């Protein structure tokens, strides 16, 4: 069956006073109906911008899709007008963000906010909309939904607000949910509950999900496939199982090294990858990771490695996977 989402060679540029930032540099991503994938990487790697491109919510006029296609259910979103996108957003593609307080309207009751989404996209009567809002809040694990509908966002805890956001994002039954750091602002116990809720709803409603996170620990048990992004490109892609067990790219290995083990959370300090991502105003030639890579060879600084499928469905863009790189000489 045809994929629900198919992104091909996506390039996004941002115009700044300093020059043009190449924020996304040739992303390919596909998602089957009902599938959950994770897009993982440090902040600034282009994962949120990829999500904003799908929603066509790039900051305007600075952010621009300069190349590529985003096929969603057979239509290229890059070519859609703002009016056409308004019909798709919230209705066919839902989105939740890190901080629900900034995306919820503080002056409107949660019930009215959910109903607002329904009003925009359906012809339900007020009674039907209320019933739907109650149903969604209940599905999102909120007790006494009838009473909660009449409350304002400030009357909810952070975790509860994220549940409201999820209820709102799923109210119209979208085929795709984009969750951008949905649990980052929450403490660890609540994080786990929200991930469990998303998993549960995904299975019940059959919604495909793109989970965006900098935290690989959140991914395990949720997404079947993981894509690791670095400096505007996907550098590794595989099943979560394969990627955790045998990461191919030195950057992924670094990320896994900085995942706190569940039991040692308090004791074990994280070992972040030394150095910083490159300046995307002037992306370096070669592999963008080479200045930070302990395995860098001469070729890495000169020529960009192509994606290589090392095992079935498990690929990475790294010279270590190329036969020509056998004769390795380290940089510096
Ligand atoms: Fe490191 Fe070279 Fe692989 Fe880049 S291509 S990750 S620099 S070994
Ligand atoms: Mg982000």
Image (spheres, rainbow, N blue to C red):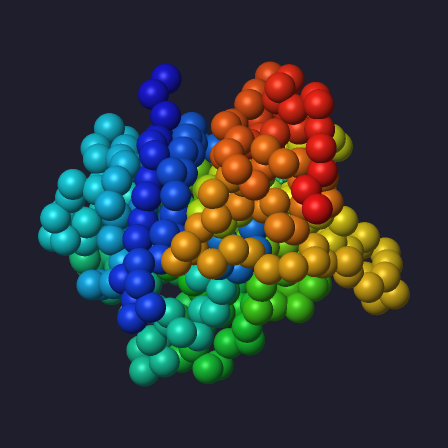
Q: Residue at x 88, y 65 (%)?
A: 267
Q: Residue at x 48, y 48 (%)?
A: 284
In this view, 90 is above or below 246: below
Residue toward you, 73 or 229: 229
Residue toward you, 247 or 76: 247
Q: Is residue 261 visible?
A: yes
Residue 144, image x, y percentages: 50, 67
How many numbered badges does the structure rendering display?
0
Left or right: residue 90 versus residue 231 is: left
Residue 142, image x, y percentages: 52, 63
Residue toward you, 318 or 83: 318
Left or right: residue 205 versus residue 192 is: left
- In the figure, residue 228 lies in which quadrant? top right
Left or right: residue 196 versus residue 29 is: right
> The N terminus is located in which quarter?
top left
Q: Residue at x 47, y 43 (%)?
A: 285
Residue toward you, 15 or 33: 15
Q: Residue at x 41, y 55 (%)?
A: 282
- In the figure, residue 192 lies in which quadrant? bottom right
Q: Is residue 201 visible?
A: no
In this view, 112 is above or below 179: below
Residue 290, image x, y percentages: 61, 45
Residue 6, image x, y percentages: 35, 31
């Amino acid at each position: 069956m045809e994929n629900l989402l198919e992104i091909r060679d996506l390039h996004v540029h941002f115009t700044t006073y300093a020059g043009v930032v190449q924020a996304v540099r040739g992303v390919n991503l596909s998602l089957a109906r009902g599938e959950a994938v994770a897009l993982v990487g440090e902040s600034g790697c282009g994962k949120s911008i990829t999500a904003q491109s799908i929603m066509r919510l790039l900051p305007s006029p600075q952010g621009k899709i300069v190349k590529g296609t985003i096929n969603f259910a057979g239509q290229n979103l890059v070519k859609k007008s703002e009016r056409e996108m308004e019909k798709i957003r919230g209705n066919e593609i839902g989105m939740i963000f890190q901080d629900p307080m900034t995306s919820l309207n503080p002056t409107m009751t949660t019930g009215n906010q959910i109903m607002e989404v329904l009003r925009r996209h359906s012809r339900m009567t007020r009674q039907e909309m209320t019933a739907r809002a109650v149903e969604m809040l209940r599905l999102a694990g909120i007790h006494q939904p009838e009473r909660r509908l009449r409350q304002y966002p400030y009357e909810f805890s952070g975790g509860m607000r994220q549940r409201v956001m999820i209820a709102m994002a799923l109210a119209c039954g979208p085929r795709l949910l984009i969750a951008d750091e949905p649990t980052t602002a929450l403490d660890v116990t609540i994080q786990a509950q929200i991930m469990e809720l998303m998993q549960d709803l995904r299975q019940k409603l059959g919604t495909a999900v793109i989970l965006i996170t900098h935290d690989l620990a959140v991914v395990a048990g949720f997404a079947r496939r993981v894509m690791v992004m670095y400096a505007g490109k996907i550098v590794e892609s595989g099943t979560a199982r394969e990627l955790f067990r045998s990461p191919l790219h030195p950057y992924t290995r670094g990320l896994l090294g900085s995942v706190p083990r569940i039991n040692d959370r308090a004791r074990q300090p994280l070992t972040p990858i030394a150095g910083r991502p490159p300046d995307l105003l002037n992306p370096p030639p070669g592999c963008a990771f080479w200045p930070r890579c302990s395995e860098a060879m001469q070729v890495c600084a000169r020529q960009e490695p192509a994606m290589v499928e090392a095992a079935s469905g498990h690929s990475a863009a790294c010279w270590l996977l190329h036969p020509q790189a056998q004769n390795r000489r380290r940089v510096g």
